[in-house]
């Protein structure tokens, strides 16, 4: 079960700890952890970073620092210690024993935030799946107190420990959730096929959490998506119609936000949601231009996107959208080698630059379909069935020369029947 940091009745006091081994920028990561803790409803009392060559296998931090942590918790009534890393069950137990304070790690914190944000049935199932997959290898027994064995009639035999019972229950629940999510994914695939058949092109909004994706979605489509200055304000994808300047109607989809060192359990659980980007015809990579970590955020998003595509290569046009330019003191260097240098500066809040963004989307969308008039001879009317399956027939009429069609079809297919185009 997730730790209930979302309870607003009592704001918990948190101590943040980290071990800097040089693998990542610990100061940046700690600032992000502080935002996560505040998003979960905690008040951050202090932050402690220890430089070490490696993480202490038994206690995460060194013994001396652990004593300081215990003393701080005692003197400041700390409710929870949050580690900026993934803790083993042994590390959690040893820190809790020494500090007499509840301990969670970065992954547990993110999972807790996701649990409080998920609204749809799919979102809730995905979060629960991630929580169970994370908890399964971390279940630890507590000796005889968790065993069904005891004294007296009816208690003899091999029995089954509570630990084994819990594991079996979790595995059964994971299997059930996966089957439910498979059904959801099948329905989503049917939607994608229907969109493709009807010639609906899709733009997917991706990006770092709190970059302003929901605000942008609301500005473009009046979607009414929750927008807050918090990490992971929205989890569930939202799809809305969008009309481009040339009058073309497309579908725009908002996706879950990314974060550095996003737990792989979440990436796996939300893969079906994240894969909305792989079905898109153009991707809008939204970043916070006012953040000093703007380029790192873009890199994180690009890395996660690459993991979703077969072969690790994003073969969809990407437009890098620099948001919050109205409050950015020093705009990032946009000469950075992005895909074909496709970038737009905007402010989703004020509406600045949205016209340029719409034009950029219009330009980036691949022209794969075309609306034409066809006159098919009577011995070629079977071509209409192919168009009806893969395209759209707007109207049809039999005339003395054959079958007249007003249709939209794939350009590649039209090239093979160009002799019948009127």
Image: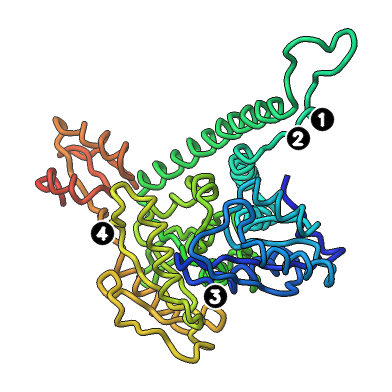
Q: CA distance from mark 3 to mark 4?
A: 46 Å
Sequence-first disc among 3 and 1: 3
Any mark on residue 27, and which?
A: 3
- Neighbourhood count class around disc 3 (C-alpha, 10 Å): few under 14, some 14–19, many 20 upward: few
Q: Measuring 38% from the left and 60% from the top, which residue is drawn there?
A: 303
Front position in the image: 208 or 46: 46
Disc 2, SS: loop
Residue receiving disc 4: 367
Q: Measuring 53% from the left and 71% from the top, which residue is drawn there?
A: 26
Q: CA distance from mark 2 to mark 1?
A: 6 Å
**Residue 219: quarter of image:** bottom right
Q: Residue 8's x, y, as percent?
A: 82, 64
The answer to whether the residue labelled 4 contacts the one labelled 2, judged by CB atoms less than 8 Å apart, is no
The answer to whether the residue labelled 2 contacts the one labelled 1, judged by CB atoms less than 8 Å apart, is yes
* Callout in the foreground (1, 4): 1
Which residue is situated farthest in the right direction here?
Answer: 152
The answer to whether the residue labelled 3 contacts the one labelled 1, judged by CB atoms less than 8 Å apart, is no
Which residue is situated farthest in the left direction here?
Answer: 419
Residue receiving disc 2: 142
- Neighbourhood count class around disc 1 (C-alpha, 10 Å): few under 14, some 14–19, many 20 upward: few
Front position in the image: 372 or 26: 26
Any mark on residue 145, and which?
A: 1
């Amino acid at each position: 079960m997730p730790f209930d940091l979302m309870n607003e009745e009592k704001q918990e006091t948190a101590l943040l700890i980290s071990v800097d081994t040089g693998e990542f920028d610990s100061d940046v990561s700690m600032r992000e952890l502080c935002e996560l803790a505040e998003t979960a409803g905690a008040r951050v009392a202090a932050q402690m970073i220890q430089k070490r060559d490696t993480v202490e296998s038994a206690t995460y931090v060194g013994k001396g620092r652990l004593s300081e942590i215990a003393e701080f918790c005692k003197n400041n009534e700390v409710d929870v210690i949050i580690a900026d890393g993934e803790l083993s069950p042994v590390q959690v137990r040893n820190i809790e024993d020494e500090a007499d304070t509840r301990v969670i790690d970065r992954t547990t914190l993110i999972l807790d935030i996701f649990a409080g944000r998920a609204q749809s049935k799919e979102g809730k199932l995905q979060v629960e799946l991630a929580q169970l997959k994370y908890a399964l290898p971390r279940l630890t027994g507590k000796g005889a107190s968790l065993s069904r064995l005891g004294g007296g009639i009816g208690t003899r035999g091999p029995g089954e420990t509570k630990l084994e019972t819990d594991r079996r229950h979790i595995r059964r629940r994971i299997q059930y959730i996966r089957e439910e999510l498979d059904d959801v994914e099948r329905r989503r695939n049917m939607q994608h096929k229907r969109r493709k058949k009807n010639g609906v092109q899709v733009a997917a909004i991706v990006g770092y959490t709190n970059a302003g994706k929901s605000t942008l979605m609301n500005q473009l489509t009046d979607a009414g998506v929750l927008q807050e200055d918090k990490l992971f304000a929205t989890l569930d994808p939202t799809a809305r119609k969008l009309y481009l300047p040339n009058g073309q109607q497309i579908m725009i989809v908002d996706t879950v936000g990314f974060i550095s060192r996003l737990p792989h359990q979440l990436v796996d659980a939300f893969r079906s949601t994240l894969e909305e980007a792989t079905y898109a015809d153009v991707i809008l990579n939204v970043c916070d231009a006012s953040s000093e970590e703007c380029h790192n955020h873009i890199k994180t998003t690009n890395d996660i996107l690459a993991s979703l595509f077969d072969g690790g290569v994003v073969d969809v046009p990407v437009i890098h959208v620099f948001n919050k330019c109205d409050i950015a003191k020093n705009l990032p260097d946009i000469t950075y080698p992005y895909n074909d240098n496709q970038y737009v500066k905007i402010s989703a809040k004020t509406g600045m630059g949205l016209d340029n963004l719409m034009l950029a989307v219009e330009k980036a969308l691949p022209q794969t379909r075309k609306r034409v008039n066809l006159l098919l001879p009577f011995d070629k009317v079977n071509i209409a069935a192919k168009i009806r399956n893969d395209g759209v027939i707007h109207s049809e009429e039999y005339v003395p020369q054959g079958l007249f069609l007003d249709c939209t079809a794939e350009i590649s297919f039209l090239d093979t029947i160009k002799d019948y185009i009127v």
